[in-house]
């Protein structure tokens, strides 16, 4: 018996219906290569290996590796921290693999950043995340936030369903959600570096007017900003939470001119 480690976010999914729902959201067939993050005791790995052509699973906890290798001889089990994983070394190419995982929640933001900014673009991503995090990811104006923009810049997010605490052992303190992220076909037309610098400056002062945040934290001249806002038919007192992804993209392009 292995004692689950809280520090590794080890809450194993024991609800068969939920496991099915995750796998079905990934629309797997025998041509698919799946990358699983944190296979744990293999509850999800089992279904993935039955549906996909190839499964690669990255697990950080050494205690689980041997058992996974015995249970799933056809799955490539890698003992590694996923945040240091290099997909190219395993021949995972752009648009040629899907990520499906019940991830440890402590790495959610870091993992999303790593996937979108460092890895070859996957075909599809299906993850379990904390329910509140899922809601923040799919947010629209007037509830826009940094996490939503970081995900929506690269993909279309959708909540597939919610998971109650009781579906996991040990039972976590928070409810969860299954989220599906479909990467955009075309890269977003704004320069990512400029876009994220701007968005971070825009959200830097909670509930303040956007214009004040950009003057203070982006080194912009108020009059120049007022002209850009007018061009975009945005009110002078608009707040960061009120801008849609497309408005942020347009703003970042106009500011580069
Ligand atoms: N997939 C299993 C399931 O659904 O029952 C286990 C999910 S559990 C929430 C998260 C798993 O990720 C654990 O097995 C944990 O050891 C592993 N893990 C935690 N941190 C990790 C990291 N940085 N890199 C790779 N795996 C990690």
Image (spheres, rainbow, N blue to C red):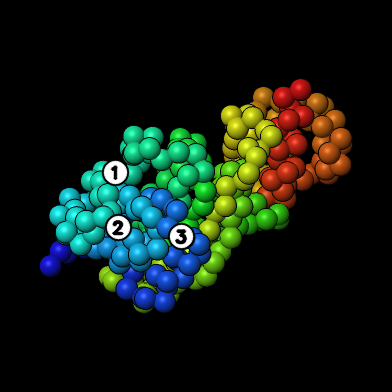
Q: Which residue is mark 1?
A: 81
Q: Quadrant of the N terminus?
A: bottom left
Task: Specify the quadrant of the image occupied by residue 84.
Answer: top left
> Tag 3, which secondary structure?
loop
Name the disc covering residue 39, or none.
Answer: 2
Distance of mark 2 from mark 1, alpha carbons? Answer: 12 Å
Q: Position of residue 235 (x, y in %)?
A: 83, 44
Q: Position of residue 122 (x, y in %)?
A: 49, 45
Q: Assess mark 1: CB under 8 A from ligand 1?
A: yes
Pointers 1 and 3 in contact (CB under 8 A)?
A: no
Return the residue found at the far left.
1
> Tag 2, which secondary structure?
loop
Residue drawn where x is 41% and y is 76% of the image? 17
Distance of mark 1 from mark 3, alpha carbons? Answer: 27 Å
Q: Quadrant of the C terminus?
A: top right
Residue drawn where x is 51% and y is 43% of the image? 95
Return the residue found at the far front.
30
Name the disc covering residue 29, or none.
Answer: 3
Q: Residues within 10 Å of mark 2 (few under 14, many from 20)?
A: many
Left or right: residue 157 versus residue 12 is right
Q: Is residue 172 above or below residue 82?
A: below
N-terminal label among 1 and 3: 3
Q: Assess mark 2: CB under 8 A from ligand 1?
A: yes
Residue 201 shows in this picture: no
């Amino acid at each position: 018996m292995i004692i689950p480690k809280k520090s590794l976010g080890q809450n194993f999914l024991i609800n068969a219906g939920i496991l099915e729902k995750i796998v079905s959201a990934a629309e797997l067939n025998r041509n698919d290569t799946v990358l699983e993050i944190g296979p744990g005791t293999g509850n999800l790995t089992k279904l993935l290996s039955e549906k996909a052509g190839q499964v690669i699973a990255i697990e950080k906890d050494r205690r689980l590796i041997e058992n996974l290798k015995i249970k799933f001889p056809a799955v490539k089990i890698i003992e590694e921290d996923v945040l240091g994983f290099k997909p190219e070394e395993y021949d995972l190419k752009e648009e040629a693999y899907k990520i499906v995982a019940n991830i440890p929640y402590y790495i959610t933001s870091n993992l999303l950043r790593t996937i979108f900014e460092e890895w070859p673009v996957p075909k599809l991503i299906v993850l379990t995340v904390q329910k509140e995090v899922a809601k923040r990811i799919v947010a629209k104006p007037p509830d826009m936030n940094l996490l939503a923009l970081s995900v929506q810049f690269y993909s279309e997010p959708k909540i597939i369903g919610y998971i109650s605490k009781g579906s996991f052992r040990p039972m976590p303190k928070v409810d969860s959600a299954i989220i599906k992220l479909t990467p955009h076909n075309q890269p977003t037309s704004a320069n990512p570096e400029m876009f994220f610098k701007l968005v971070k400056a825009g959200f830097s002062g909670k509930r303040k007017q956007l214009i004040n945040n950009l003057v203070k934290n982006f080194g912009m001249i108020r009059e120049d900003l007022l002209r850009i806002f007018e061009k975009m038919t945005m009110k002078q007192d608009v707040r960061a939470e009120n801008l849609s992804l497309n408005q942020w993209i347009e703003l970042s392009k106009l500011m580069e001119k």
